[in-house]
Image (cartoon, rainbow, N blue to C red):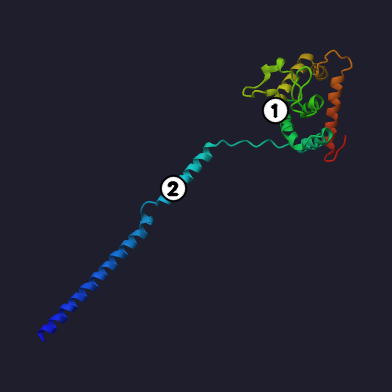
Amino acid sequence: MSATISLKSITGRRTDATLSFIQHSIMIVGLMLLLGAVKPLFGGRSDSDAQQAAEVVTVGEAAEAEPVKAAPEALPPRLQRVLDFVSRRYRVAPEALVPVFEAAQTVGRERRVDPLLIIAIIGIESRFNPFAESAFGAKGLMQVIPGYHMDKVPQGAGEQPFLDPVTNIQVGVHVLEEAIRWRGGLTAGLQHYGGAPDDPETGYANKVMAEKQRLEQAARRGPGARV
């Protein structure tokens, strides 16, 4: 009987030890899981979080480093109406005329020359063909002769500056200014620009001013104007 009691006692102690071990194991596992959940809140970031943060910083730096390009200056309604008229008159797509009109507006303001005068000269000289070339070697929208006016080309204008619409207009208006100043007036200056300074009938100047008058009428009449 004492042997039976001892066996039961030993068996009971073993059972208690096993249960105690299991309880301690569960507590340790639970503690480890708890620490793993708390670490992202109070500790460092995960690898994916660090990578995302690095990408955000990189994108931000790239955005700051990239220069902001200035938007083209919008044409006022007056010039937009003239553009529509020129598009119909010369059969040129409006999209192709926009940079020409923007350049005429900008250069005209800088040089204090009426943009409509610039546009009228372009119409007479090249019919808005930026690649036009005369038998005398005059090139581009305002038919500038490169051999005489290379000194007026701005720096960084490229290998073919006279075929670039903006550069051609800049140089052409500069040539016109000099001609007007040298000849003492608009009509004489236009005649000099057109290569006919000795024409007593001022035929070239008359053509340019007639074209300018048509543009002014189109600006006043609005959409659908036919001059």
Which residue lies most toward the right here?
201
Give residue 30's position: percent from left, percent from top. Answer: 32, 65
In the displayed structure, 52 sits above or below 126; it is below
Type of the residue with mark 1? Val
Give residue 172's position: percent from left, percent from top. Answer: 73, 22
Element type at marker 2?
A: helix
Q: Residue at 83% of width from left, 24% of height from top? A: 208
Is residue 111 something that shows in the picture?
Answer: no
Mark 1 surroundings: few (<14), some (14-19) or many (≥20) residues within 10 A: many
Q: Nearer the viewer, residue 62 or 73?
A: 62
Q: Alpha-carbon distance for marks 1 and 2?
A: 46 Å
Q: Residue at 77% of width from left, 35% of height from top? A: 79
Give residue 146's position: percent from left, percent from top. Answer: 71, 18
Which residue lies most toward the bottom here?
1
Q: Which residue is mark 1?
A: 166
Give residue 83's position: percent from left, percent from top. Answer: 78, 35
> What is the tally of numbered marks visible in this picture?
2
Q: Residue at 27% of width from left, 67% of height from top? A: 25
Which residue lies most toward the top here?
198
- The disc, 1 or 2, on the residue closer to the chain's N-terminal end is 2
Quadrant for the N terminus in the image: bottom left
Quadrant for the C terminus in the image: top right
Residue 98's quadrant in the figure? Answer: top right
Q: Of the numbered discs in the image, which one, if any, rests on residue 51?
A: 2
Q: Is residue 138 left or right of residue 53?
A: right
Type of the residue with mark 2? Gln
